[in-house]
Image: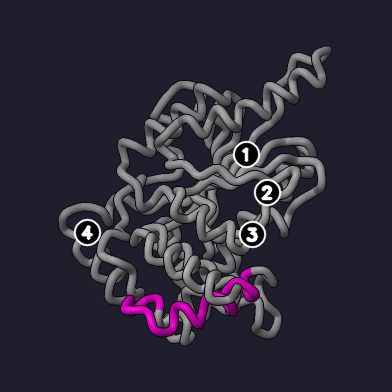
Amino acid sequence: MNAEHDKELETALSGLSDVAATALVTLYCRAIESQVEAPILHDDMAVAICSSLSPALANSPDRLRRSLAHGEFNRDLCVHIAMRTNYYDEAGRAFLKRQPRGVVVNLGCGLDTRFLRIDNGQAPFFDLDLEEMIRLRRMYVSERENCQMIACSLFDYRWMERVAQEERVAQEERAAREDKRPMLFLAEGVFVYQEAAKVRALVLEIQRRFPGSELLCEVFNSYFLSKAWKPLVDVIMQRGFGFGAEAKYRFGIRESREMESWGSGIEFLGDWSFFDTHHPRLGWLGRLGRFEFARKTEWTVHYRLN
């Protein structure tokens, strides 16, 4: 059985693209953070998954995967990822407190285990990612009655039919009411790797199909995607963090309200940067939060898609 599992795992890992493999980084960041004193977040499932993955990654020809297995990568990144993940968890909990039977859609879920951390026992969850990632995910994370996985590209809109079916069922169950089930779409560390035109089209399609839904997504400052800065950003990603050649930032905005200009009805609700936590573990970097250019390098925006 172990040999069969190892072979299946090797096949699943070898099928990951450079962008999909960034999910391994966020997984290990959550696992490492979960084991320090006074952690920013607890993710016992991440610890368990990493324990299983590390032997397979330890001898990988890929430098990043080897470094993850041996714990030899930027520990400051663990802090930043933990803060970001914790914020998205808190945003999910706040949404479910307002809308206990709302729908949560985790776009580009990777190996995230948010459902286990914020499930309220009532709200349906959908974890969406490419088939290659869902294949790996299913080896460690099981579907539940109210948490389903969808193996599909963000830009193959057929996944929206699966989510829309939940809304149709909900409407049938409460036929006397006219309101729709509220929806929250989470895109943590996903859009930044995608082509800008595709991200814009996706957001507008979500707005069209699920009016009134909320979107929480991470963005990068498009100023640093200019010809003058992009080569440096790519070097930092590939040499500084060891990401694969195709794991490059491609999408960004200049200021938090920019998506409002994409179409009528898109409403800016707020934004967040890890500088906003004022956490002591940010160290000297925390001082940069006083400057807007630093706060708005990579941050999260929150919209309602009316």
Q: Residue at x 82, y 47 (%)?
A: 121
Q: Nearer the viewer, mark 4 or mark 2?
A: 2
In the image, residue 229 above or below residue 56: above
Residue 184 shows which numbered tag?
A: 1
Quadrant housing residue 176: top right
Q: Return the residue at label 3.
A: 141
Does the segment drawn in magenta span residue 190? no
Q: Return the residue at label 4.
A: 230
Q: Secondary structure at mark 3?
A: loop
Three-letter amino acid code at the position of disc 3 = Val
Q: Is residue 223 left or right of residue 282?
A: left
Separation (CA) of disc 4 from disc 1: 32 Å
Q: Secondary structure at mark 4?
A: helix
Q: Nearer the viewer, mark 1 or mark 3?
A: 3
Q: Residue at x 68, y 37 (%)?
A: 103
Q: Is residue 94 left or right of residue 28?
A: right
Residue 92 shows which numbered tag?
A: 2
User: Crowdedness of circle 3 by 10 Å Cα count: few (<14), some, many (20+)?
Assistant: some
Q: Nearer the viewer, mark 2 or mark 3?
A: 3
Magenta residues span 46-65
